[in-house]
Image: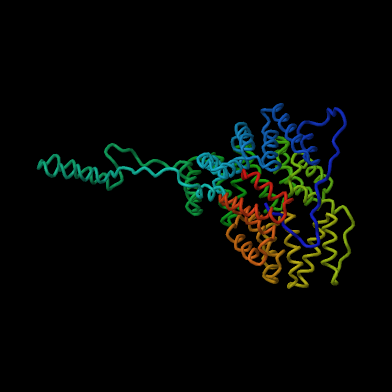
Amino acid sequence: MPMLRQPGVRSAACDSAALPQGTMPSLSHEQLGALYYQRGDKQKALEHYREAAREAPHDPAIQKSLADFCFVGLGQAEEALQAYSRVLALKADDTEVLHIAGNLCTTLKRFEEARGYYTRLLAVQPWNTDARKALQALPADTVPETKPDSFTDILQDARRSFSSGTQTGLDEAIDRLVEYKRGNTPGATQPRKRTYDDILDIIRQGDDAAAIDALEAFLAEVPDHADAHNALGVICYRTGAVDRSLEHYRKAVALAPGNATFRKNLADYLFVVSRDAEAALEQYVQLLRAQPQDAETLIALAQICAELGKTDDALVFVDSLLSLQPWNTQARELRNALHAVKTPRIAQENGENTHEQARVALTDGRTVEAARLLEQRVHTHPDDAAARNDLGFVYYQLGRTAEAGRQYEEATRLDPQNDVYSKNLADYYVVAKGRFEDALSIYVRLLRQTPKDVDTLIGIGRICELLGRIDDARDFCRKALDVEPWNEMARDILGRLGA
């Protein structure tokens, strides 16, 4: 993806790691893979991740580390997909892996496999709108089979009875027509009760009110169905009935205590809605005991510890995650924020230097402090486009993506001629929102103004790749290399496209 830009501030480089000398029994192959990755030796890193996976074939977390490295670190979609398949063989309901596998298959144009992964994901998370949209966007592979028209068959049979002129045949034909109109067929039993799979179809259609009614009726008949309780909790939360959500989340966990998705939903609710950090911490600790290398659990524990003021504990969890996934940007930014609160805070500044001090703080890795100073600047100077652009950059680094987008849009509105702000907004649309058409309109406008702008050419090429327009993607990246033959990003994209 294109990198977001911020004038005057460079992004922090990854920490370099000195590789151990000789044999280090205390370091696992997975840890060695992380160290080599930080040193930039991807081939050595791959060897160790593969060896770790070979030594622990039944550990889904280690298999997932190999898959993540192949996907994020190397961009090798085929090998990553194979590794993710091994994870799913060990942990069939891993929603993150199901989603990634579906996206990878879509990119590789293996649409039937993608359909299978998205369908499995929706069976676990029927409320997942991203998966539902991805499933609906897949090209149709078969023409729906036309079902026989039962009424026509019965009517033709009746007509034959009428033409025979026999009263018995006529009576039988009329009886069959009446039974069909009532929704029955001769010898039919009572209407079939709605199954949970039927309810999943309703949820996938996005009709929340109908889904709630169906789930409540289903749970009245099957009160111990954990998936139904979890689904009802999610939909109640989404529709504003948050108090009811907690009841169903707790019931789902009580019925299926080993289901990580149900427990994560409960923990997230306790932390975000109830603001009960201690109770959420208890749930996440149980998750970590079952899955010591789960990335979502480690980052959540770090955030909760930070909320409780336990900065050192939070850093332990963040560092544990980074030892497994050194490329994890969210964890690295959280670590910067945690280190910021351990250093003396910059004095409150009400003058004109607030913006500059924010840039100094960000350069030093004090992201939270930079956000506070920029918020103060924007509050006192709402028309400062540069401050809004920088605040968008900081919000994005802190994971506050929706707020970042608003600041980028406002910066561009205030100063529409600034190419950096426009590029940031276009990059945000691609990376955070998948709004390719909106991003493309910005890039095209910029390209008309500056036909040889390398960032713009690569940005358009990346969008063309994501939209499956491979020839166009190659053309734009080649034009970028005509201007900057040394540009690594353009070369990487062309290499991935087989150019």
Could you tell whether 190 is left or right of 267 in the image?
Answer: left
Q: Quarter-wise, where is residue 16 in the image?
A: top right
Residue 400 locus on image (x, y percent)? 70, 57
175 and 334: which is toward the camera? 334
Residue 160 locus on image (x, y percent)? 15, 42
| Residue at the farthest front position | 482
Could you tell whether 349 is left or right of 206 in the image?
Answer: right
Residue 28 locus on image (x, y percent)? 79, 31
Quadrant of the drawing holding the C terminus: top right
The residue lying at 66 percent from left, 28 percent from top is 58
Q: Quarter-wise, where is residue 11 in the image?
A: bottom right
435 and 241: which is toward the camera? 435
The residue lying at 31 percent from left, 38 percent from top is 188
Residue 116 locus on image (x, y percent)? 52, 39
Q: Is residue 30 above or below residue 182?
A: above
Q: In the rendered picture of this protein, how many numbered marks are placed on residues?
A: 0
Q: Quarter-wise, where is residue 378 in the image?
A: bottom right
| Residue at the farthest left position | 165
